[in-house]
Amino acid sequence: MPVFDSLNFDDHEGVHFFSDDASGLKTIIAVHDTTRGPAAGGTRLWTYDNPQAAIDDALNLSRAMSYKNAMADIPFGGGKGVIMRPSGDFDRKALFESYGKAIESLGGVYCTAEDVGVSTADMEVVRTQTAYVAGLDTGTAASGDPSPVTAEGVFRGLHVAAKNALGQSDLKNVRVAVQGLGHVGYSLCEKLRRAGAKLWVADINEQAVLKAEQELGAVIVSTNEIYAQDVDIFAPCALGGAINSNSIDQLKAKIIGGAANNQLATADMGAALRERGILFCPDYVLNGGGIINVAAELSGRYNPSWVDEKLNGLCQTLNDIFKTAEQENLPTSIVADRMARQRIQTAAL
Ligand code: NAD
């Protein structure tokens, strides 16, 4: 299917395809919008069923990055890199060197960092080929893995949600079901535990759930049953599409708020959550902490107070979304999209 016919095509400014037989690289770098600045967004390394699935993912995720960066109030537009994981054994260094060359060839229109399946070590390899990369462990402005900051943003945002939906200003004894205990999910669990929340967790990685049970007293739940837990908050921290026509009727939580991108499998899920009295924290608002951290690094001078201020700004934005949704009787997802588009349009003036 041509890119233009994809349901996820949203007048993207550019969709770039790179392939390199020697390293096995097959990547799509989608640049959605650069009105607010160069496109910034992480790189995902994933096994896709077919190239179309990878294209759709890149288109969808890059649009979400435009919205995320606008809501995080950072001077970047939206883009995303998607690498189709080569089948069998492959030379990881060669793959990311080749990917770095691809980014360099775009001349700065796209800046990258880690996303699912990609590590700080991979980004160090990318850096050997291009300066348009962050989330590094070394260098003058190095900020490392953005995941802990993403988790901090989600954690702070959940306080705002709890205040709005549960009438509680802290998370003490709040029951939280966390789906996915990876870089962000586990860090979020640690913070929640320290705040006195009670945890139910699921992951396809058995080691991760056992660790959470031992270290954080979490209750382990199967990946199928995590949706139906009798909890206050459901936190999707795995992949996208957690809220779908199957899962929605299982939910007992009053709040949906987690790190995963594109949590609503279809746009109508936003209204479906509202009808059920469930407060949805728009994912690209709640999980903006990581890109804020990346932006601090890309500025060339990492400033922790700037990051802290921007995280508090996210909480203010989230609160504004909740209030507007209430006043206008609209899904929070619709209000957030509208606000993000307004911020992008205002930057164009
Ligand atoms: P990760 O790969 O470290 O963790 C994902 C976890 O989800 C893994 O432990 C994996 O085993 C688990 N998982 C996969 N399928 C599952 C399933 N069906 N049920 C339960 N668990 C499952 O990724 P991450 O960096 O922690 O990111 C998590 C999500 O947050 C992703 O959607 C990512 O795009 C998004 N996100 C991450 C960041 C960041 O800073 N890392 C920033 C913004 C958004």
Image (cartoon, rainbow, N blue to C red):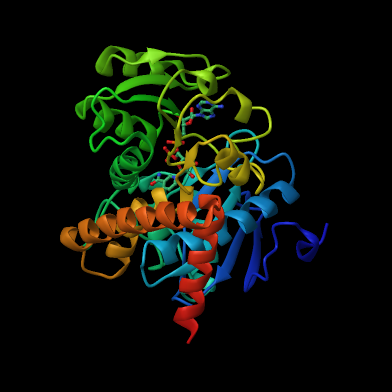
Residue 287 shows in this picture: no
User: In this view of the protein, which residue sits in the foreground, 259 or 334?
Assistant: 334
Residue 107's place in the image compared with 5, above or below, is below
Give the quarter of the figure containing the N terminus: bottom right
Residue at 21% across, 30% down: 195
Rendering coords of residue 101 (x, y %): 51, 65
Residue at 33% across, 49% down: 146
* Residue 87 relative to residue 64: left or right: right
Residue 89's place in the image compared with 314, above or below, is above
Rendering coords of residue 4 (x, y %): 77, 66
Rendering coords of residue 336 (x, y %): 49, 58
Farthest-out residue, bottom:
349
Residue at 31% across, 28% down: 189
The number of numbered discs placed on residues in the rendered structure image is 0
Residue at 76% across, 58% down: 6
User: In this view of the protein, which residue sits in the foreground, 299 or 212?
Assistant: 212
Rendering coords of residue 53 (x, y %): 71, 47
Residue 253 shows in this picture: yes
Where on the picture, by quarter, is residue 2?
A: bottom right
* Residue 45 relative to residue 181: left or right: right
